[in-house]
Image (cartoon, grey):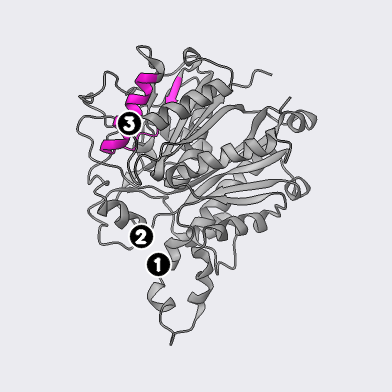
Amino acid sequence: MAERVYITGMGMITAIGDNVAGNLQSLQQQRSGLTQTQYLNTIYKEVLPVAEVGHPSSSLATMAGIQDTAGYTRTSLLGIIAMQEAITQAGLTSDDLANTGLVNATTVGGMCDTEQVYFDIIDPEKNGDFIKYIDTLDCADCTLRLAQHYGINGHITTISTACSSSANALLFGARLIKQGLANRVICGGTEALTRFTLNGFNSLKNIDKQPCRPFDNSRNGLNLGEGAAFLILESDTLAKSRNANIIAELAGYCNTNEAFHPTAPSPNGDGAYQAMKGAIEMAGKTPADIQYVNVHGTATLSNDLSEGNALQRLFGTTVPPFSSTKPFTGHTLAAAGAIEAIYAVLAIHQHSIWPNLHFTAQMDELSISPQTKLLEQITVNNVISNSFGFGGNNASLLLSKYEG
């Protein structure tokens, strides 16, 4: 029988908190991280709100314990900080890490720093320290730095499937464990704001100049964010043999590719429907067992219509409470799946459902609306966390209460 996969450590940094406790406090206080950027050099500084981690890169380096910062991009620093918290919570030693795997996700690697020196890089007459940042553009660069920083020597790889990247990282890590190819894998993602990404989404007319309004009839696009999150996945056998503190179970997962359009999902929600259905079936559960869905909920016209139709197809007239937490964190792209997986685990532990901020009017095309008030002191045993990316990359995770 394949091993069950447990979560034994979690760490994160986002615009609403430097760690898991800080994020939880902001969720409970319904405090959004959306504001104007302080650190991204962009012509849209006063125009497009973002959810930016509230520290300059120099302070992040201090928080990460990095003294020689050459070649360490903001992407890598965010990842190191989040991973440290997860490792500490899991109680892992350097010997443990030597036999641990790492699946890291990012969409544009160290673009945040290489775009600052782009014109120096392409000038053959120039030379200087900027050359150290050329290789950081490779998405695998930050993965390598994370692995080297913590002495991780197990299976190491990078996943970049747009906005579903770190959900797929968790999925892949769980598959390694279930197939007996690893017994412990650190999975997650890290993403820093870049002009490249902001300009790209803006050119697609997918960014709202106001705080985003997922599943609202007046929604007009997303707000970008940055952050990092990592979860420690361990096999049933390993976690119990070392008396690890088991936080939750990754009970089910599924990814699909509907291949409908390069940047738009199927309006009927075909891929989202199959991903959620597959995750529930893998866990041996039914739709009635789900108490909360942390939706992808980007607030774009196409995503929310597609995801809403998928929810109605799967759950019928009894759609469980659902909400998007992107009005808190912005859309953190590759990091979003891991960040929201932690929010799903927090919902289970705190007996809470997080509110969908900024919602005022139900979409004309749907008969459902998101949860807009913070729900507390309710039973939450099973949560679906959705992450859907360009190119039809759909991933759903089912996080469950650890029953012992």
Label 2 – label 1 distance at C-alpha: 8 Å
- Which of the two marks, 3 or 2, is nearer to us in this view? 3
Q: Quadrant of the N terminus?
A: top right
First in sequence: mark 2 or mark 1?
A: 1
Residue at screen point 68% across, 46% down? 101
Q: At which x and y percent is residue 153?
A: 72, 53
Q: State yes or no: discs 3 and 2 in contact (Cβ < 8 Å).
A: no
Label 3 – label 2 distance at C-alpha: 27 Å
Closer to us: 26 or 298: 298
Label 3 – label 1 distance at C-alpha: 34 Å
Q: State yes or no: discs 2 and 1 in contact (Cβ < 8 Å).
A: yes
Q: At which x and y percent is residue 19?
A: 52, 42
Say which residue label 3 marks: 306
| Side of 315 relative to 8 (left or right) | left
| Residue 301 located within the stretch drawn in magenta | yes
Residue at screen point 59% across, 55% down? 143
Disc on res. 115: 1
Name the secondary structure under disc 3.
helix
* Relative height, residue 240 to residue 97 (above, below): above
Near mark 1 (Cα within 10 A), the count class, few <14, some 14-19 or many ≥20, is: some
- The range drawn in magenta is 292-313
Q: How many marks?
A: 3
The residue type indicated by label 2 comes to Phe
* Relative height, residue 38 to residue 177 (above, below): below
* Relative height, residue 201 to residue 260 (above, below): below
First in sequence: mark 3 or mark 2?
A: 2
The residue type indicated by label 3 comes to Ser
Disc on res. 245: none
| Residue 106 located within the stretch drawn in magenta | no
Say which residue label 2 marks: 196
Q: At which x and y percent is residue 81?
A: 56, 50
